[in-house]
Image (cartoon, rainbow, N blue to C red):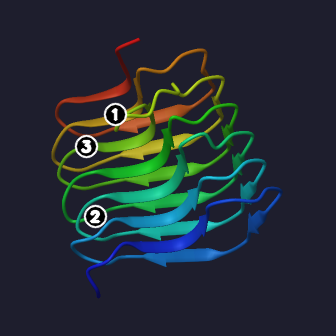
């Protein structure tokens, strides 16, 4: 393995892209690993098998910045680094996205989250109006973990998700700030 960030797919601009029926594997050590990173609008991510398994900072799907109107549907997502910070689907200051019918597994030492919505790093747009429905989320590991984690987000919808956590200091759904 190398030491730089690793991307299965990264879409930084454009719209109406379809990422479907792929097997995506990233696993570099000492780097961030992204199965799919979206910074663009109106994309469809469906029927993929996504595995990220580096040491830390493993993202199955990252919906970044002001990306909006993306659909993440019916994927199998496994983020299982040897360290911490393993995320199934991470909304980072993004809005109006749909995440539905995915199987999400996260595992590692700490900060393993199935779905996370937050704002950080100087961005001002809060994740909002995202729909997270009918997902199966399994969290394992040895440290803090949340099935769904919300920080500084608003007007999001969570319906019919099946969340299992088997970690000390874990929560099915954890809400903090705004």
Query: Is the C-beta separation of discs 3 and 1 under 8 Å?
Result: no
Q: Residue furthest top?
A: 178
Residue 132: % across, % down: 62, 32
Disc with the residue nearer the chain's start (1 vs 2): 2
Numbered circle sitting on residue 146:
1
In the rendered image of this protein, does residue 41 appear above or below residue 154? below
Labels 2 and 3 touching (C-beta < 8 A): no
Nearer to us in this view, 4 or 56: 4
Q: What residue do we see at 71% from left, 62% from top?
A: 47
Q: Earlier in the sequence, mark 3 or mark 1?
A: 3
Cα distance, mark 2 to mark 3? 11 Å
On screen, residue 101 above or below 32? above
**Element on which disc 1 rests:** strand
Q: How many marks?
A: 3
Q: Which mark is residue 63?
A: none
Quarter of the image with the C terminus is top left
Residue pointed to by mark 2? 81
Disc 3: which residue: 111
Q: Position of residue 138 (x, y in %)?
A: 42, 45
Q: 143 or 95, which lies in front?
A: 95
Residue drawn at (51%, 34%), measured in percent from left and top?
A: 93
Question: What SS does tag 2 mark?
Answer: loop
For marks 1 and 2, give the CA distance. 16 Å
Within-10-Å neighbours for mark 1: few <14, some 14–19, many 20+: many
């Amino acid at each position: 393995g190398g030491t730089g960030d690793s991307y299965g797919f990264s879409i930084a601009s454009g719209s109406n892209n379809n990422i479907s029926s792929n097997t995506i594997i990233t696993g570099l050590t000492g780097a961030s690993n992204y199965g799919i990173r979206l910074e663009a609008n109106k994309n469809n991510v469906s029927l993929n098998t996504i595995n990220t398994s580096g040491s830390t900072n493993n993202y199955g799907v990252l919906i970044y910045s002001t990306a909006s109107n993306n659909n993440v549907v019916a994927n199998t997502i496994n983020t299982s680094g040897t360290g911490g910070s393993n995320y199934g689907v991470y909304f980072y200051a993004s809005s109006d996205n749909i995440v539905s019918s995915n199987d999400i597994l996260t595992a590692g030492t700490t900060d393993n989250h199935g779905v996370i919505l937050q704002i950080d790093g100087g961005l001002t747009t809060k994740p909002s109006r995202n729909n997270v429905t009918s997902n199966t989320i399994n969290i394992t590991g040895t440290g803090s973990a949340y099935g769904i984690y919300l920080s500084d987000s608003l007007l999001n919808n969570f319906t019919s998700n099946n969340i299992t956590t088997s970690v000390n200091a874990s929560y099915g759904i954890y809400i903090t700030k705004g």
